[in-house]
Amino acid sequence: QAGLLAKELGYKVYAVGGFVRDILLARPNLDIDLVVEGDGIRFAHALSQARQGRVKEHQKFKTAVVVFPDGQRIDVATARLEYYEYPTALPTVELSSIKMDLYRRDFSINALALNLSPGHFGQLMDFFGSQRDIKEKTIRVLHSLSFVEDPTRILRAVRFEQRFNFRIDGQTLRLIKNAVQLNLFSRLSGARIAHELQLILDEENVLECLSRLQDLKLLAAIHPQLHLDADRTRVLMELRKVHDWYRLLYLEPPVNTWKLYMLGLTMGAERDSLELVCRRLRFSDRELREFLALRDLLGESLARLMTWAETQSSMSDIYFALDPLPVEGVLFLMARSRREIMRKNISQYLTRLRTQELLIDGSDLKIMGLKNGPNFARVLRKVRAAAIDGAAVTRDKQVELAK
Ligand code: CTP
């Protein structure tokens, strides 16, 4: 349908990028990117009208997103016919605009186009050896200035390499090392780095990605404080396990992967350095305040857990040690802990204690003549401790205790 619509407008349309790559790799990918030889925005409107969608335009970049009623989104870009000037006196060559569009992309594996135009439907346009690189499992840039144009591509190279179990090709690797030496990352905005890091942290192979980033000195290039030592590596490995465990159980609230891994990546950093890392990654003032506060809370909770570990007192102590923390903090302490018993207790807290309801509430206390205030909280805390520790599991017992 897209091809026919384009033809009616006198355009050609192609599916490009990750969508085509993933077809060849037989991996699911629902993010469709189209490139139009013609007016991409006009085409987007035609496409949206045909299937009752909505269009969000970006006039400046001549791109648009079409969102359909079932939630599907299609990105549409315009390939402009451009003239490629050779530096010498050779004549200016007109390249087909789809070829130019593909040439500007990051890696050969992402530079394939699938022709959707009637008469050529399904024709694969491979100008840069993309199929060969996919077959040979190679990540390769299309030209030597690729990382200079956009240093975030360095992080993308590692992400794709680890995701597909490919290898970054030799020349591309040299360009990466060069880029590190030239400190190209310093030119990048924190927001763009943070975005790429977030994508990495969402990958299934997050640890392999992080350790490759470390080997290539890329973490230190983002900020020297982000280097991985043995302690951080161990905790990050555990973080992945507890993160996946928590998600598999569909526990609420959902965990913020970014916040969780940032705790691991910055573990042990002094407060001042931590602040610098966060600022480099463009945390807003509020995010920074919250992150620093979380670190302080973690320190307090950790101290209480250590006391518990020495005395092995009651489970309610675990509850009150963890209760002030958001879920990311609790998972972090679980990952950080070396003792099996402690990990087990923390998992008990997350799966059971945390949501255990008391059998009495504020209205019961009011009936008993208690006034709302600090007393209220103190009594409820006492009842909760008894409920958790098995001393007051019936309503009668809890009422009695409250009195
Ligand atoms: N692209 C690029 N340079 C970048 C980012 C993107 O050249 N810094 C191009 C690539 O051709 C990529 C396409 O834009 O295939 C779409 O980008 P994105 O959606 O981020 O990449 P995908 O390849 O679809 O990656 P993913 O599978 O992670 O969604």
Image (cartoon, rainbow, N blue to C red):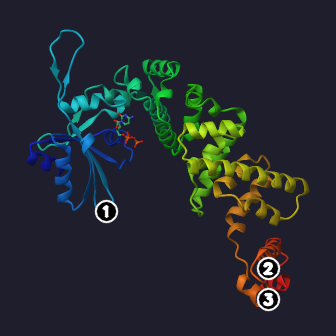
Marks 1 and 2 close (CB-CB < 8 Å): no
**Which residue is painted at 36% across and 41% down in the image?**
22
Q: How many labels does the image show?
A: 3
Which x, y percent locates residue 219? 58, 31
Would residue 140 be seen by someone viewing this image from the given angle? no
Residue 70 numbered tag: 1
Residue with the mark numbered 3 = 369
Q: How crowded is mark 2: few (under 14 residues within 10 Å), some or many (20 or more)?
A: some
Which x, y percent locates residue 184? 48, 24
Q: In which quarter of the image is residue 172?
A: top left
Report helix, strand or loop for mark 1: loop
Q: Which of 379 and 216 is in front in this view?
A: 379
Q: What residue type is labelled 2?
A: Val
Q: Nearer the observer, disc 2 or disc 3? A: 3
Q: Is residue 160 left or right of residue 246?
A: left
Q: Quadrant of ligand 1?
A: top left
Q: Which of marks 1 and 3 is nearer the N terminus?
A: 1
Task: Quote the CA–CA distance across marks 1 and 2.
Answer: 48 Å
**Which residue is painted at 66% across and 47% down in the image?**
292
Residue 393 numbered tag: 2
Q: In which quarter of the image is the C terminus?
A: bottom right
Q: In this view, does 236 lie to the left or right of 30?
A: right
**Which residue is painted at 69% across and 58% down in the image?**
325
Task: Quote the CA–CA distance across marks 2 and 3.
Answer: 23 Å
Q: Earlier in the sequence, mark 1 or mark 2?
A: 1
**Which residue is painted at 70% across and 48% down in the image?**
295
Which x, y percent locates residue 257? 57, 50
Up-down: is 111 above or below 341?
above
Q: What residue type is labelled 1?
A: Asp
Q: Nearer the viewer, residue 32 or 196?
A: 196
Report helix, strand or loop for mark 3: loop
